[in-house]
Structures are given as C-alpha cells and as structure tokens.
Image: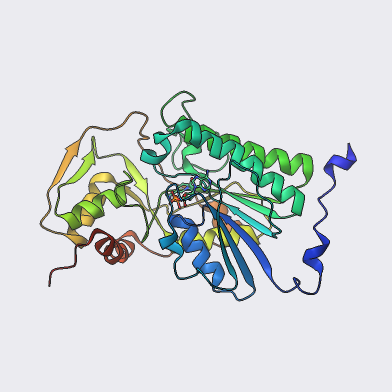
Amino acid sequence: NSAAKAPPTPSPLRFSKFFQSNMRILITGGAGFIGSHLVDRLMENEKNEVIVADNYFTGSKDNLKKWIGHPRFELIRHDVTEPLLVEVDQIYHLACPASPIFYKYNPVKTIKTNVIGTLNMLGLAKRVGARILLTSTSEVYGDPLIHPQNESYWGNVNPIGVRSCYDEGKRVAETLMFDYHRQHGIEIRIARIFNTYGPRMNIDDGRVVSNFIAQAIRNEPLTVQAPGTQTRSFCYVSDMVDGLIRLMEGENTGPINIGNPGEFTMIELAENVKELINPEVKIISVENTPDDPRQRKPDITKAKELLGWEPKIKLRDGLPLMEEDFRQRLGVPRKN
Ligand code: NAD
C-alpha cells in the first residue's frame, strides 16, 4: 500500500532554527576501534554533534577520552539489543564485536546484536527520518569461490559453523536494511568492510595484524596459521573512515566494498612486521581454525566509480603507525 511506502517525515524539531545548522550523528559501537576513529573525524567538523551509544563489550571509553566533556559530544552506555530514542539525522551503525575471539565468546549475543540491534536502529531511523549506514563485512562472502569479490557475488557461507553468528548475522542485517528501504522508504547505506588495521585495535583479539604486532613488540615468535599462503587485504583505518563518510554522504545505497585490494599472504605479512618492528623475532607455523577463508580481496571498482574513493596508505606505511600505540598499551617502550 502507498502509505507504507511513503518516506518518513523528519521530526519538525530538527528543522527549527535552533537545530538547523547542526548535523546530529549517532554512532553505535563508537567506542570501538573503527568507531572511535570515525568519531575523531566527524568531530573535526564544527557543524557535527556526535552521540556514541556503546555497551563497552569490546570498546572502551579510553578511545574517546579526548571528547568526553566536549559540548558537541555525548556518550551513552547502551546495548543496541534494547531500543534507543534519540533525535538524529544520521546513524552509523557499527555496534558488533568484530574479531572472532569476541564474536564467538557469546554467539547468541552476537546474533542478537546483529539482528535485534539492527532492527532497533532501523526502527529509530524510521521514527526520526534518519539516514542509516550499516558496517557489514567481507565475511558475507564466506569462503569465496570467486576472486576478487565484487558486490554482486552472493557468497559461500556455512550457515551452521562457529563463524555463522557473525557472517549470517551480518547477512540478515543487510536483508533488514533493504527490507526497511523497500517497505518504509528508509535511506540506507551498506559498507562491506574488509580487514582494517590501525591504532586502537584490540590487543590479543586474535586478529592477525594485532597478533603479529603484539608478538613482535613482546619479542615472541610470530604465529602464522598453516599453511600461511592464505591471503588477506588490509586497509588502514583512516582510509576506511574516509570511505564510510563518502558512502554516507553520497547517493548510493550500496552494498559497496570498502577495503584495500593490496593482497598479502600471512607469511608475507609476518615478514613485513618482523622487518619493520622487530627483526630479531622468529616466525613459526601453527594450526588453523575451522572455516578460515583461504583468500579474500575486495574488488573496489564500485567504490572508485561511485564514491571516488580508494585507499591511500600502503601496508608498509600503516604498520609502523600502530607501533607507538601498541607499545604504550603493552607497556614496552622502544629500545634505543
Ligand atoms: P570493535 O569491536 O573495536 O568495535 C565494536 C564496538 O561495538 C565496540 O565498542 C563494542 O563495545 C560495541 N558493541 C558490541 N556489541 C554491542 C551491543 N550489543 N550494543 C552496543 N555496543 C556494542 O570492532 P571494529 O573493528 O571497530 O568494528 C566496527 C564494525 O565494523 C563492526 O560492525 C564490524 O562488524 C565491522 N567490521 C570491522 C572489520 C575490521 O577489520 N575491523 C571488518 C569487517 C567489518
């Protein structure tokens, strides 16, 4: 029926003189790794008011400490599996543990976060007339049968594996986004994020870049999962944030891959970390985890064409930018 398809009416409050000039932006998961860098970038614009909603499961107030108390910034302890009502113009919906150690820790909670959390944020977007961006993942492609992956590929995903709470959760989240768009006229944006790295990544979260850097700094062997020839692509976080903002501000719903197509085997990554951070460490081979994809690399043609975006920071330039942050948090100063 036509009533259901009519675009939502934005709240009159936000068109009043007082609110006119400011853009109110909600970031769920804004205390996390990518979210906190997104907050930093959005806060640079004096016209933005930023609200972060986070339950601190994998994120931390520390990541936002420079903004706490700022008049244009608000931090709310909130779990997205519960409804939230705030007057906003844009929602960046990032809340979800991103690394296997954390998303497998309580898989039922992970799927609730993806499904109920996304439903709640879509309900909010509908109610206040906000545009909403979901950070989906390259994991929606599963163990891909085509290489590199473009957005029209439907994926090869195990629905009952230990990673499914995350992969399938994000796939349902994408479905919900499109159903709200088609049924209720909500303005949606979907980013399919590929591996991202940079300062403030959780240490010891099992993600390969943070593992290797922490191991190199602690002078422990770098543990490459067998066979070591599996590949990943790594995008530096400032490039990622730039891509997310362009997607939000642009006219395309997506899904759009955002990642760095530069492909590295795990052995190459370990060798780079060794050379750049600690030439003394050993590289050893360890057993792999089930369902670990063999290859993953984004096809970013769409991001280039539609967003005018491509990553600028090369892996060899980005890795050293993490060292200082990791050394501080690990309490291991550099030897001179
Ligand atoms: P992160 O774990 O550092 O951040 C996630 C944030 O969400 C944390 O602050 C956490 O406390 C919060 N959170 C988790 N569950 C919540 C809940 N139920 N309610 C409220 N807050 C909750 O991870 P990240 O790397 O910053 O990832 C951000 C987003 O990007 C996630 O949606 C993730 O799936 C996606 N993504 C990340 C990568 C990557 O390489 N980092 C790759 C693909 C997709």
From this view, report whether residue 26 is shown above or below residue 182. below
Residue at the location (23% across, 56% down)? 273
Residue at left offset 24%, top offset 63%: 327
Q: Measured from the top left, where is residue 177 in percent x and y?
A: 66, 42
Decide which of 34, 188 is in the foreground and name it.
34
Could you tell me residue 181's position as x and y percent?
A: 73, 44
282 relative position to 31: left or right: left
Front-most of 281 and 106?
Answer: 106
Q: Quadrant of the C terminus?
A: bottom left
Residue 334 falls in image quadrant:
bottom left
Percent x, y of residue 41: 52, 68
* Residue 77 image offset from top left, x and y in percent: 54, 53
Give the quadrant of the N terminus. Answer: top right
Looking at the picture, tell me which residue is in the foreground, 253 or 54: 54
Q: Could you tell me if residue 145 is visible in this image?
A: no
**Side of 281 relative to 71 (left or right):** left
